[in-house]
Image (spheres, coloured by chain):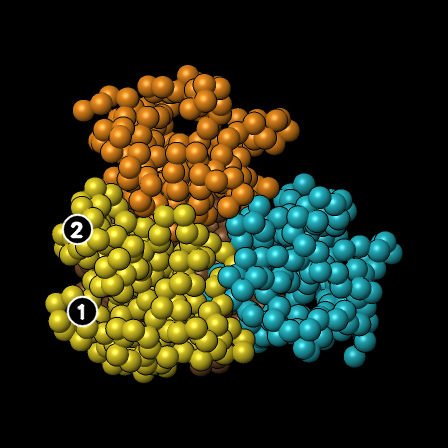
Chain colours: A cyan, B yellow, C orange, D brown
Amino acid sequence: MNRTAVDTEGAWFEPERITELRRLLPIPYVDVVPVRTDVDGTVTDVGLLLRASGSGRIVRTIISGRVLVHETLREAIARHVEKDLGPMAMPRIPASPTPFTVAEYFPTPGQSLFTDPRQHAISLAYLVPMGGETEPQEDALELAWLPVQELLDSTILDEMEGGHDIVVRRALAHAGVI
Amino acid sequence: MNRTAVDTEGAWFEPERITELRRLLPIPYVDVVPVRTDVDGTVTDVGLLLRASGSGRIVRTIISGRVLVHETLREAIARHVEKDLGPMAMPRIPASPTPFTVAEYFPTPGQSLFTDPRQHAISLAYLVPMGGETEPQEDALELAWLPVQELLDSTILDEMEGGHDIVVRRALAHAGVI
Amino acid sequence: MNRTAVDTEGAWFEPERITELRRLLPIPYVDVVPVRTDVDGTVTDVGLLLRASGSGRIVRTIISGRVLVHETLREAIARHVEKDLGPMAMPRIPASPTPFTVAEYFPTPGQSLFTDPRQHAISLAYLVPMGGETEPQEDALELAWLPVQELLDSTILDEMEGGHDIVVRRALAHAGVI
Amino acid sequence: MNRTAVDTEGAWFEPERITELRRLLPIPYVDVVPVRTDVDGTVTDVGLLLRASGSGRIVRTIISGRVLVHETLREAIARHVEKDLGPMAMPRIPASPTPFTVAEYFPTPGQSLFTDPRQHAISLAYLVPMGGETEPQEDALELAWLPVQELLDSTILDEMEGGHDIVVRRALAHAGVI
């Protein structure tokens, strides 16, 4: 098994194999926007990861990864949260399987608001409050919890890649805080 | 202040006053379906209250009550949960203010699937996982946590009044368990 | 019956009466964001009304109005659309009664993102594609259909009052176009 | 190109190829519940197809099919509606890309409420009102429009396979008619 492939894709395929599959099928994904909430459920902070992008730049990202064959969406969400935020994050996965939005990532910019040079991914996006302790794992350099207003006043969202800023903005609109 | 009015309505009005208001305006409500969830967010149990109905029958109900003037929906949800399940229920009020359904209660049966002989109420319905200890309060005689399948196999839902069974079924459909 | 009260409120009350009710109860509202869609359902244009605000300024607004007692939400949506856009608008009221967001308007700025100096209103917000011909009615001076990108590139949203810009932005986020 | 594969899968693969892919990845699907609505948007009728199932039985089904690589969800919905209901169906594809539910089909019964012996499919489910004339196409034997109450009073839903009845019930719950 190729360790790099596992780390970056959560996929148990050789890199050549996943490259081939990506030419043939849309790849099912989950996007997770990690948040902290008040006692009354109001979103207060958004968790963003700092990691090296494919092109070598350092970028802020949300949690995003493949759904594996025979894996439920809940299992995929839990697995990717644990992979990125550690085993003590205690995610409160929503009771409903309905995502707050669906992000369609295409290799060609302009076909939608979302791009992924590697593939056509169909990503179900969830807002997940974290109830425990989080720490960046593996290839994430840092995890920052940003108060909503501070995030909006900064340029952080504008610097996110592939449309991840739009996923975050839709999450905050869905949560009623913007 | 009339204690009965407070208990049964959560309203700080004389009974005559609320009766008059109900003839003039639709009354904003929140309906809360209390649930227990698995570690992965799956709904496992539904909490139903046993209480005396207006007509003197003993009925199973969900949590339901008025939104007061100048009160936010989150405050109304928290207040009614505490009033019915006690101060240690630790409700996980959803991050989004969007209800899973809107139940329109009319005094006249047949105008919608929901009836309330007292009023036209527009109720925003929320699925709220409880993270703490719950115990029936005030005029509730009992709180029963029913596993989803046991609830569906029983006649409990069919015996609920005013369309509360439909609110519960929509909650379970929204949660992806039926 | 006071004609002004009917025109501006859609309410069959004397002005003194509605003023009194507003001190006692939250007032149920519907907000409607009128849109034009492509053949594939994509939102292309947003319809905004130009009208005189309470303070005498000329402002852009969405459709917004009270739900009357004994009126269903669908009836309220249809009535307000017809009142503002005329009888030939042919609104495609969504199949689901679930709003895309709930806007809580408070008289005191800061209690939420939405303000209405007259009242505490709880407004269920719907995105409604119009299939027919629209023309401004009664006290609306103009109805403008604005392409989404043009709207976002302009300052129109920033000039809207009471948080109507936020309702429009949430509608567009819900529709997946921003 | 294998014509059977195109008809039954909407996929431009040899049967052996799609069989292999199905062992490797979850397959992205769309499920469409075709409905007729009243002028006020209320769902009145559900459209069900009669076709031969994989096992040779005659079964009622909803519209269901793969999303192809580089195809948007809206294109996939429009393509499958046209394939099953003909070119004059005039589907009113919802303005929002958010499905009303996500059905996870697994080959092994019991892993979820949905089964598909051929594959692990992740299906985004949409309620789509039809504004035009519909007629069954290709391998569909019949298309029946069933009034909601008649459908619920019959045994039709119980006879549907793979969990399609649950998709229909969730659609009707979402639409507020059950």
What chain does mark 2 sit on? Answer: B
Give the letter of the chain under mark 1.
B
Left or right, A157 with respect to B154, comes to: right
Which secondary structure, mark 1? loop
Give the distance between the C-alpha atoms of the residues marked 2 and 1, in whole angstroms. 20 Å
Measuring 70% from the left and 49% from the top, which residue is drawn there? A150
Inspect this view and state whether residue D60 appears.
no
At label 1, which amino acid type do we have?
Ser
| Residue sitting farthest toward the right | A56
Residue B70 picture location, percent across and down: 41, 48
| Residue A14 placement, left or right of C21 | right
Q: Nearer the viewer, residue C89 or D139?
A: C89
Disc 2 to disc 1: CB gap under 8 Å: no
Q: Secondary structure under badge 2? A: helix
Up/down of B164 relative to C32, above or below: below
x%, y% of residue C98? 38, 51
C136 w.r.t. C161: above or below: above
Q: Mark 2 highlights which residue?
A: B16
User: Would residue C37 appear left or right of A16 to someone viewing this image?
Assistant: left
Residue depicted at x 43% and y 63%: B78
Outermost residue to the front = B1
Callout count = 2
Q: Residue at x 21, y 78 (%)?
A: B155
Q: Residues within 10 Å of mark 2 (few under 14, many from 20)?
A: few
Which residue lies most toward the top here? Answer: C141
Q: Earlier in the sequence, mark 2 or mark 1?
A: 2
Other residues around mark 1 within 10 Å, as few (<14) / some (14–19) / many (≥20): few
The label number, if any, that marks residue B53 in the structure image: 1
Residue A9 tag number: none
Q: Position of residue D28 (x, y in %)?
A: 55, 61
